[in-house]
Amino acid sequence: MPANGSMTCDAGKFTKPTYVGGGVFVSGSANALGTSTGTAAVTVDGNGAHISLAITTTGNGLTATANLQGAVKTVDSTYFTGSVGGLGSGAMVTIGDAGNGAIFVVASYSVALGNSNVYRGIATFTCH
């Protein structure tokens, strides 16, 4: 990880998020899996890597975006933000060394949709 500065992140890779509870759910296996896209931004300073994620999830006919921020001090650190494991939007985020000065940003995230349906998935980004 660089000592200071901004890193450019790729478009990310996402698992298909899965309905985990809350709200009114339209039954059927097609509604249990959603789709996600998103962005990551990383700025590094003397206090570590400051990470901002914007993850947009669509499921059960609804779409919402979770904006999730936090910081890690080292490449073996993790941060939690929002409602991780609950029925709200949140994430557990960690970073890892991707080699050649790059890092991986890995997030286990939840996004609460408009009717309180919550979908959970995993996102990975490579940042240089």
Image (spheres, helix red, strand yellow):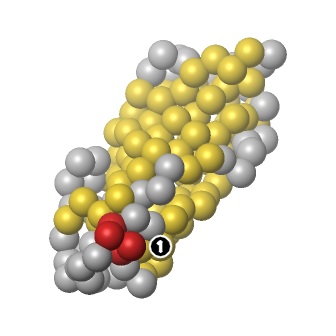
Quadrant of the rendered structure where residue 101 is? top right
The N terminus lies in which quarter of the figure? top right
Above or below for 67 versus 92: below
Q: Residue furthest front?
A: 29
Q: Nearer the viewer, residue 43 or 29?
A: 29
Above or below for 120 versus 62: above
SS class of the residue under badge 1? strand
Residue 7 placed where, x, y %? 75, 36
What's the amino acid at mark 1?
Answer: Thr
Taking the spot 64% from the left edge, 40% from the top edge, the residue there is 125
At label 1, counting other C-alpha atoms closer than 10 Å, the crowd grade (few under 14, some 14-19, many 20 or more) is many
Left or right of 102? Residue 15 is: left
Taking the spot 48% from the left edge, 16% from the top edge, the residue there is 76
Left or right of 128? Residue 111 is: left
On the question of residue 66 being in view, the answer is yes
Disc 1 marks which residue?
Answer: 58
The C terminus lies in which quarter of the figure? top right
Residue 33 placed where, x, y %? 40, 64
Count of marks placed on residues: 1
Q: Nearer the viewer, residue 30 or 107?
A: 30
Residue 114 placed where, x, y %? 34, 81
On the question of residue 69 being in view, the answer is no
Left or right of 36? Residue 44 is: right
Taking the spot 73% from the left edge, 42% from the top edge, the residue there is 9
Above or below for 116 versus 92: below
